[in-house]
Image (spheres, grey):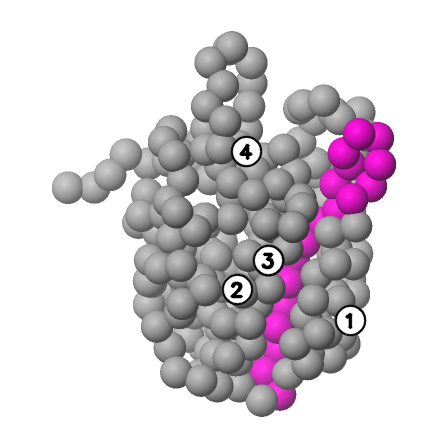
Amino acid sequence: MNMKVVPHPAKFTDTLIPIFYDLLKDRLSILDPMAGVGGITKLHDLGYTGLIYCNELEPEWAEQIEGAYKVTTCDARNLPYPDNFFDAICTSPVYGNRMSDHHNARDGSRRITYRHQLGRKLTEGNTGMLQWGEKYKQAHIEIWTECYRVLCPKGLFVVNVSDHIRGGKIMPVTDWHVEALRGLGLELMKHIRVPTPRMRYGANRNLRVEHESVLVFQK
């Protein structure tokens, strides 16, 4: 029996998919280790003919993935693949903003968070409960280390991420991911800034970073 369809709060925007395609069209295999509902599989609609693997920790979202060669449901810190397995990795980590909140609000306000969309507590290990800070950084160092392990030499590592505003100040999330991935030995090849629509809810609704970043690294 199929589970109830649960919306995901942070799907890839349509403007990103052609960018990913141009970067990855010649790669034989791609992994999204935090795939949500599998937006990365839209690459097939543009003509990508390689194998797309998706990993998503929450079963309600993993069940909705269509078009993937293989779907797994495990913690991205412990992927079930051997070393140097994938030609490319393409993913979007949580941004550490107010969407990452495990509080179960009952005040009737509109909240678009991973916790509220799922309708239950997040599975242990889901970074969707981590706001920007040391726990966020440590979790992503562990995830990126595992991704580095399964990426083949000369493989591409594509990360879609964004800064956000907290207390009227821009949080340097993108720069942190750049340095974290460089620290693993990856070389930054491109930093593509993509204007994208942003949600207009929450305390900083009138203050938004008006672009997302696509970071392209090579192992």
Q: Amino acid at mark 2?
A: Ile
Tell which circle, 2 or 4, labels the residue nearer the N-terminal end: 4
Q: Residue 119: percent from the left, percent from the top?
A: 38, 29
Tell which circle, 1 or 3, labels the residue nearer the N-terminal end: 3
Tell which circle, 3 or 2, labels the residue nearer the N-terminal end: 3
Q: Which mark is residue 190?
A: 1
- Residue under numbered circle 4: 101
Label 2, secondary structure: give it: helix
Q: Amino acid at mark 1?
A: Lys
Q: Residue at x 63, y 68 (%)?
A: 158
10 Å crowding of disc 3: few (<14), some (14-19), many (20+): few
Q: Which residues are magenta?
A: 154-171
Label 4, secondary structure: give it: loop
Tell which circle, 3 or 4, labels the residue nearer the N-terminal end: 4
Q: Is residue 165 left or right of residue 84?
A: right
Q: Residue 175: percent from the left, percent from the top?
A: 78, 58
| Direction right: furthest residue | 169
Q: Quadrant of residue 20?
A: bottom right
Q: Which mark is residue 27?
A: none
| Direction left: furthest residue | 1
- Residue 192 against residue 202 in the figure, above or below: below
Q: Residue at x 46, y 28 (%)?
A: 116
Dot in front, 1 or 4: 4
Dot in front, 3 or 2: 3
Q: Residue 60: percent from the left, percent from the top?
A: 32, 43
- Residue under numbered circle 2: 143
10 Å crowding of disc 1: few (<14), some (14-19), many (20+): few
- Residue 130 against residue 47 in the figure, above or below: above
- Residue under numbered circle 3: 138
Q: Amino acid at mark 4?
A: Asp
